Amino acid sequence: MSLPLILMMYSLSTIIHQTIVIVSWSLLFLLFAQYFYPKYTTCCFIPRSLRMQ
């Protein structure tokens, strides 16, 4: 394998890893917000529940 190809693969893997980490942390933060701060998250879900009724 040539060096540029290895560098490209390495950069791609780091970018993918960073995006996975960011997505997982944001999902964890959303779950945390829903469980511990229902006052702030219910504001987002009130219109949806009103539409269901």
Image (cartoon, helix red, strand yellow):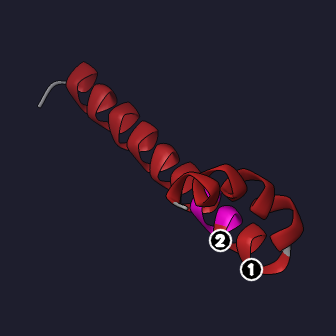
Q: Residue at x 39, y 32 (%)?
A: 11
Q: Residue at x 25, y 25 (%)?
A: 3
Depth check, front residue: 13 or 37: 37
Q: Residue at x 77, y 68 (%)?
A: 33
Q: Is residue 19 above or below residue 23?
A: above
Quick one: SS at disc 2?
helix
Tell me where residue 7 sits by quadrant.
Answer: top left
The range drawn in magenta is 26-30
Q: Which residue is mark 1?
A: 35
Task: Give coordinates of residue 23: x percent, y percent.
Answer: 53, 52
Depth check, front residue: 16 or 40: 40
Please name the amino acid that badge 2 sits on.
Leu
> Are the two marked residues, 2 and 1, in contact with CB atoms closer than 8 angstroms?
yes
Q: Is residue 11 above or below residue 26?
A: above
Quick one: SS at disc 1?
helix
Please name the amino acid that badge 1 sits on.
Tyr
Labelled disc at residue 8: none
* The furthest residue to the top: 4
Task: Give coordinates of residue 43: x percent, y percent.
Answer: 80, 55
Q: Which residue is mark 2?
A: 31
